[in-house]
């Protein structure tokens, strides 16, 4: 049995993206997009990302060169989703696809190593990264509303890549169980195992009966920008690279997992978040009752997958582990609360009771 037994090791996760020659990137941007000017590399988990600033107009863009293991079908999923969102809710602050000089939304490129990659150019969203902004309750509620609007915009959109297996898909949370063997602390390992046990017992059998659609699937604070002049206003939603077709409630679970405050009343920090989402996109009783279990499952995935990847790519460990310590603290806080208490609080906040269910 391998160390990662039970985890479907996707090459796109296990292999770091090869570096690209900056001169090649500049020439590529000029040839296919007519952009010449300043280029600055940006951080990314799998892809190679670059901020371009046109010397002629001063306009900024973000060039994404996908991981060579990512198929064009997966990249097209993200591309078509952004095009759909632009039509469904033009006011949502998401990046816009910038076509090539000949009008294509994306293209295949080969930087010279024989490994074709998908390239796309996006509009560059100005704003302050949410982790650098002061946190307020108004900001948190606006964040929940923005996610609900995004999910409403994605309703009715579909793509064949949505059904592909994705390691970060909460539906597959139990696939990380084999990675828990690498957790050195017995108490932490037992905590993660209890959470996965609850997921397999209480959530996994229910998920197939819940409404599904394409979801963002990575609505964490690092993928959100706020207005520097009004940090309560959400100015940008980034990174659609983990999109998947999944139960709608999974998107809220991912986002809520990053809103937990383990140093205070963890539950009080996410109940208003859930209620604000529900006010824009009403949840069903079944979705609400499984939400807390999905939140803890997501936290287990964060500590398990990020720890496993950091051990294989120590050079990128700081980026990969940026949520690890806090995720452990959040998972411990959730373990103290328990699913019954949390679910009851969510139902009250959403105006549900034993005899009434929101459609």
Image: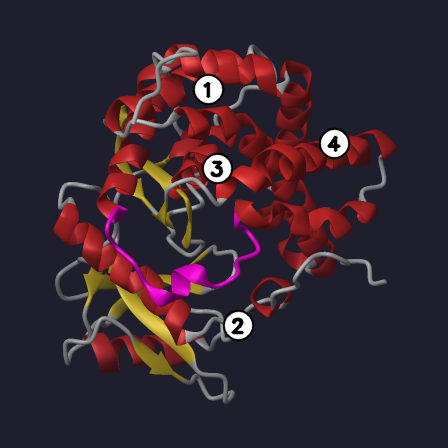
Residue highlighted by disc 1 = 270
Real-space Cα distance between discs 2 and 1? Answer: 39 Å
Question: Disc 1 vs disc 4: which is toward the camera?
Answer: 4
Q: Position of residue 321 (x, y in %)?
A: 63, 44
Task: Using the image as rendered, state which of residue 288 and residue 45 is in the foreground.
Answer: 288
Part of the protein shown in magenta: 154-169
Q: Position of residue 337 (x, y in %)?
A: 63, 15
Residue highlighted by disc 2 = 19
Quarter of the figure with residue 78: bottom left
Q: Is residue 231 magenta?
A: no
Residue highlighted by disc 4 = 194
Residue highlighted by disc 3 = 254
Q: Is residue 65 something that shows in the picture?
A: no
- The residue drawn where x is 38% and y is 51% is 239
- The residue drawn where x is 66% and y is 63% is 9
Label 2 CA crowd tier, 10 Å (few <14, some 14–19, many 20+)? few
Tell me whether the residue at label 2 lies in contact with that at label 3, contact meaning CB atoms closer than 8 angstroms.
no
């Amino acid at each position: 049995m391998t160390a990662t037994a039970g985890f479907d090791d996707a090459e796109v996760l296990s292999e770091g993206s090869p570096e690209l020659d900056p001169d090649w990137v500049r020439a590529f941007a000029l040839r296919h997009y007519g952009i010449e000017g300043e280029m600055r590399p940006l951080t990314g988990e799998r892809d190679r990302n670059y901020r371009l600033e046109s010397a002629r107009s001063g306009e900024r863009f973000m060039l994404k060169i996908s991981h060579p293991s990512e198929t064009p079908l997966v990249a097209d999923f993200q591309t078509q989703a952004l095009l759909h969102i632009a039509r469904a809710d033009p006011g949502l602050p998401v990046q816009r696809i910038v076509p090539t000089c000949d009008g294509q939304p994306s293209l295949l490129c080969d930087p010279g190593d024989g490994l074709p990659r998908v390239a796309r150019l996006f509009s560059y969203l100005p704003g302050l990264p949410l982790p650098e902004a002061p946190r307020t309750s108004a900001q948190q509620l606006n964040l929940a509303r923005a996610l609900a609007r995004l999910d409403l915009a994605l309703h009715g959109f579909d793509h064949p890549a949505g059904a592909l297996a994705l390691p970060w898909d909460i539906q597959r949370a139990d696939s990380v169980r084999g990675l828990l063997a690498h957790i050195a602390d017995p108490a932490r390992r037992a905590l993660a195992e209890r959470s996965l046990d609850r997921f397999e017992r209480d959530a996994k059998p229910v998920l197939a009966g819940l409404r599904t659609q394409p979801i963002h699937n990575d609505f964490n604070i690092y993928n959100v920008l706020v207005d520097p002049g009004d940090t309560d206003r959400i100015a940008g939603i980034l990174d659609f690279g983990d999109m998947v077709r999944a139960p709608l409630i999974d998107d809220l679970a991912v986002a809520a997992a990053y809103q937990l405050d383990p140093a205070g009343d963890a539950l009080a920090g996410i109940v208003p978040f859930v209620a604000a989402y529900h006010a824009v996109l009403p949840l069903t009783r079944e979705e609400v009752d499984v939400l807390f279990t999905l939140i803890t499952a997501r936290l287990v995935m964060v500590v398990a997958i990020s720890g496993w990847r950091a051990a294989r790519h120590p050079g990128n460990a700081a980026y990969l582990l940026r949520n690890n310590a806090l995720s452990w603290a959040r998972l411990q806080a959730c373990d103290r609360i328990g699913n019954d208490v949390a679910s009851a609080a969510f139902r009250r906040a959403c105006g549900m009771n034993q005899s009434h269910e929101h459609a």
